């Protein structure tokens, strides 16, 4: 994955996470927003790997906060 695409996915992921926090994860608005974001994704496999990476990173940060 190129740096340009990584940054693009980073922006989309952050935008979607912020939207879900505001509107809820299972709301109709969140589903609509995801469809808008999914149209901007060049490679679904890369997006899936990027999501897995970010989720693992968040779990590690959460775990580190618990054991401080």
Image (spheres, grey):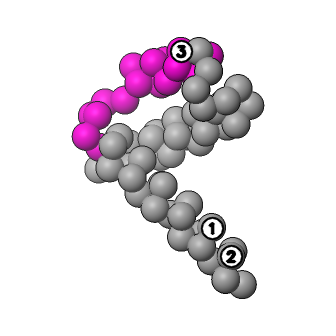
| Residue hosting label 1 | 62
Residue for point 52% across, 40% down = 13
Mark 3 and mark 2: Cα distance apart in space: 34 Å
Magenta: main secondary structure: helix
- Name the spot of residue 43 as percent of width and height, x first: 27, 34
| Residue hosting label 2 | 66
Q: Residues within 10 Å of mark 3 (few under 14, many from 20)?
A: few
Mark 3 and mark 1: Cα distance apart in space: 29 Å
For the residue pair 6 and 38, the one nearer the viewer reads as 38
Q: Secondary structure at mark 1?
A: helix
Tell me whether the residue at label 2 lies in contact with that at label 1, contact meaning CB atoms closer than 8 angstroms: yes
- Picture layout, residue 63 above or below residue 13: below
Tell me whether the residue at label 3 lies in contact with that at label 1, contact meaning CB atoms closer than 8 angstroms: no
- Name the spot of residue 40 as percent of width and height, x first: 41, 24
Residue segment shown in magenta: 29-46
For the residue pair 14 and 26, the one nearer the viewer reads as 26
- Name the spot of residue 53 as percent of width and height, x first: 41, 57
Name the image quarter holding the C terminus.
Answer: bottom right
| Residue hosting label 3 | 32
Q: Secondary structure at mark 3?
A: helix
């Amino acid at each position: 994955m190129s740096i340009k695409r990584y940054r693009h996915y980073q922006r989309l992921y952050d935008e979607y996470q912020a939207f879900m926090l505001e509107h809820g994860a299972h709301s109709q608005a969140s589903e609509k927003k995801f469809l808008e974001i999914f149209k901007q994704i060049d490679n679904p496999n890369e997006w899936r790997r990027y999501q897995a990476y970010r989720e693992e990173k968040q779990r590690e940060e959460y775990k580190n906060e618990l054991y401080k």
